[in-house]
Amino acid sequence: MDRRDFLIAGAAAGLSPNLLTSALAAPPHAHAELGAKDAAAKNTAAACGPGYASPAEAMKAPREKLLYTIGLYVGSDDKKPDFLATVDADPDSATYSKVIHRLPMPFVGDELHHFGWNACSSCHGDADGPARRFLIVPGQRSSRIYIVDTADPRAPKIHKVISPESIKQKTKLTAPHTVHCLPDGQIMISMLGDADGNAPGGFLLLDENFDIAGRWERNARGMKFNYDFWYQPRFNTMVSSEWAAPKTYYNGFKLEDVKAGKFGQRIHFWDWKGHSISESIDLGEQGLIPLEVRFHHAPDSPHGFVGAALSSTMWHFHLNAEGWHADKVIEVATVEVKEWPIPVPGLITDLLISMDDRYLYFSNWLHGDIRQYDISDPAKPKLTGQVWIGGVIGKGSEIAGKKVAGGPQMLQLSLDGRRLFVTTSLFSSWDNQFYPDMAKTGSLLLQVDCDLAGGMKLNDRFLVDFGKEPLGPARAHEMRYPGGDCTSDIWV
């Protein structure tokens, strides 16, 4: 009996939670080693299908030399289409730390936001399956979805456009957010609104030809809002989080919306095979607006984290014989700032886990810091590094003579865990509310060097200033590498 069968059978038999949790309490690197052995047994070829056989193999991949991010004009006076930027991340290149290609979208007003690949390591082992070639790039405001071909990785091209009208007609969904490929070759996208922009939204499926295949969920009872998701098939589980209805967050943040219960505070655990919610956890006032959610990369680990943005708390979720549980493990204290009506929260807006499941990184967009925690014991994170970039409390200094209009927001870590890339824009209307200068100055793309023994340092060689874009200041958000990254690759 393997670890997965042991856990499921043990839980079904009502075994002691202490027994199960102690059996699963091996440090994350042990999970990674086990995952690597499982993968090695299933994949005899060195490379078979997209992605990597295991997280350990992913860490051995060549260093990223290109990086994709979006350039956003929504929310500014520039009525121009958003674009996909290709950034040179090769330190030996003459164009290092520069945008070397821009792919403009054919429409204005999309608000490109999060995007992902058509295939990742969940498809590894399928030699006849799809290659990691196409980026699925949704517009958060327009609900339009672009399929971008990266056959020429330095100069991607638009392959297909899926209209918002067809999505509404076939699924009654809008406001696409997180993109994940599935092991069967389909692509799933969390949708935050219905056809009219109301909650709770749902999950959109695209087939291998990027045609609309319908909705994934069969029973979403208990889900008030939608946002991010991550699946862990060995436990027959997907976890999702909650933001708000598009009608609520599109125009910015209002305290009265919090008091009216218009923001989420629950995470949901789904029956992966049954496509229905099996358990929901209400995080309460200490878990307001749970956004990014991550399982460990090791496919046999029942541990993960979710960051509650408004409450500025980090939660560790885990499975024992009684079901799924979530415990608050980190709390970022509020700070009094002159002319602010309330104490300023850190506002945890992004998080990720290193490929070896050793470090947790998260950004406090309002305070202006990125934190690194050792999560060898996921129930007891230990702070090992911190850097300051912008923010409203005055600790973020200028970077290469450039004043930061914004704070650290989206994060992407290299597969080997040594380079953390960060952008400073959250969402156009929220940017304009909390960092009004960003519409005129643009945002930044920066690099933080990470010590594998713990610690971080801002790299002064790498700075992409989107305020200097040829068509005017733009904002950058999520990032992807051609070879895969720490927030898109999942193992089954």
Image (cartoon, rainbow, N blue to C red):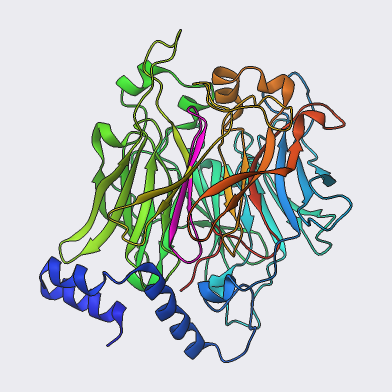
Q: Position of residue 369 (x, y in %)?
A: 50, 35
Residue in the picture at 56% in, 44% down: 176
| Viewport quadrant of the N terminus | bottom left
Q: Position of residue 267 (x, y in %)?
A: 32, 47
Using residue 441 as the reference point, say whether residue 207 is left or right of it: left
Using residue 458 as the reference point, say whether residue 235 is left or right of it: left
Residue in the picture at 33% in, 33% down: 288
**As rendered, which of 318 and 159 lies closer to the eye?**
318
Look at the image and tell me whether residue 273 can be seen.
no
Using residue 197 as the reference point, say whether residue 89 is left or right of it: right
Q: Position of residue 283 (x, y in %)?
A: 26, 40
**As rendered, which of 395 and 145 lies closer to the eye?**
395
Q: Is residue 357 highlighted in magenta?
A: yes
Q: Is residue 251 above or below residue 131?
A: above
Quadrant housing residue 477: top right
Q: Position of residue 140 (x, y in %)?
A: 60, 38
Quadrant housing residue 50: bottom right
Q: Is residue 165 above or below residue 47?
A: above
Look at the image and tell me whether residue 333 can be seen.
yes
Q: Is residue 365 above or below residue 358?
A: above
Q: Is residue 58 above or below residue 172?
A: below
Which stretch did the figure color magenta? Answer: 351-370
